[in-house]
Amino acid sequence: MARVRFAPSPTGYLHIGSARTALFNWVYARSSGGKFLLRIEDTDIARSEERFLEEIVTDLKWLGINWDEPPLRQSKRFDVYRSSAESLVKSGKAYREGDAYIFKMPEGRTIEIDDMIHGKVSFNTNDIKDQVMIKSDGSPAYNFCCVVDDAHLGITHIIRGDDHLSNTPKQILFYEALGLPVPKFGHMPLIMGADGAKLSKRHGGVSVEEYKAEGYLPEALVNYLLLLGWSPGGDREIITLDEAVKIFDIKNMTGVQAKFDLQKLRWINGEYLARKSGKDLLPMVKKIMADSGNTNLASDEVLIRLIDLYKIRIKTLAEFITATDHFFGDVYSIDEKGVEKHLKSAENKSILNHFAGLLEHMDDFSHAKLEEACRTMAEDKGLKAGQIIHPTRVAISGKTTGAGLFEMMEILGKPKVIERMRRAGS
Ligand code: GLU
């Protein structure tokens, strides 16, 4: 049975690349009936922080990743690493330099890795220097405690980023020296920005938290990360975690460099948003609104109506806030070009005032009645409906785009609509 693990260091937030690593290990375990484990690599006591660990755990759960056994914490196992290192000194494979334990690199050996993603990769031990196993401060070096723990946990497959490829021959030598079975390795190309540079904030963000805060749905982020290293076959681009588990085959993972394409992620997020109901999205929208300091919340009922109206027009939930700001008070973004085009002429002002006059007499402010009133006025005055609709839209929302005008008017309500139209028409 396959046993895989994700081994984050809690020295920072969950990087998007690490989230992808976790995801592929998880999918591998779930698709093969194996186990997925979490190991906390908190050997760097000074840099490891509990708040980072909590956030990593929260983010993994948010993505839908769960683990099958209690997480192992490396900071609790320093004695185990030391006694393993001790055994290698006893068998003559390692030596001590003061308090440090150092592994003697064998000379002239070729270490071949049959990588599950890249195929065969070879290293010569002459290019690798002696390896510290335990540092003089008593803390273990990554390559060594990683091997001790992977063996202890019975890990059979290790899927991780290419940044660890050069560590793998060192780790294989530790397995051999300790007389432990060597797991299979698969290294994924690192995620780069679209311009080929290291992924950074300007490419859209590096941590899962940043995407969460922008209002990306976990399903969409998961879907996108799955495509960054694996192909579900054909041109398929929308795939859920459950479906991926059903059809995943590590053979379809690619060794080709993964480029982060924010536009594609946005498109995928838009697809998932459109499929959700306003009710489903309500808690996330409320959280994002509260986080962005928007205290002027409408009732849940109104919010749900707005989400249902706008979810097909936005790519992130953060965009919902800007797209709908005119529903939440009188301070909202104004498209100045739109104002220039639709609200400046005397003719448009008079159209607005005439329409506002008609609306003042309406008791039923439903979108159907509003539309009827607009069409009737257009006919009476020999106007095209657009000549009424465009100025009215800019007058009540400050924008030239948005949801259907009459739905917007209905939700905004008669007093606000008329007040804004009169102001724009004056
Ligand atoms: N803590 C290491 C990292 O986050 C784990 C590497 C590994 O999977 O072996 O890069």
Image (cartoon, rainbow, N blue to C red):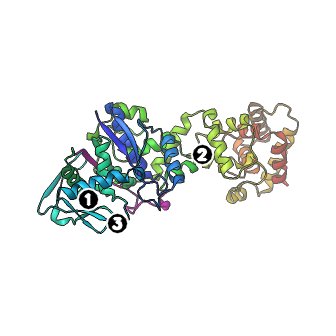
Range of residues picked out in magenta: 181-205
Determine whether 266 is above or below 98 in the image: above
Q: Earlier in the sequence, mark 2 or mark 1?
A: 1
Type of residue at label 3? Ser
Task: State which quarter of the image contains the N terminus.
Answer: top left
Q: Residue at image x 34%, y 66%?
A: 136
Q: List the residue tagged with mark 3.
A: 136
Q: Name which quarter of the figure residue 227 lies in.
A: top left
Q: CA distance from mark 2 to mark 1?
A: 40 Å
Where residue 243 sits in the image (x, y, percent)?
40, 32
The residue indicated by pointer 2 is 317
Q: Amino acid at mark 2?
A: Leu
- Residue wearing tag 1: 166
Q: Is residue 56 left or right of residue 281?
A: left
Q: Is residue 201 magenta?
A: yes
Q: Nearer the viewer, mark 2 or mark 3?
A: 3
Can residue 65 be seen in this snapshot? yes
Element at label 1 = helix
Question: Could you tell which of marks 1 and 3 lies nearer the N-terminus?
Answer: 3
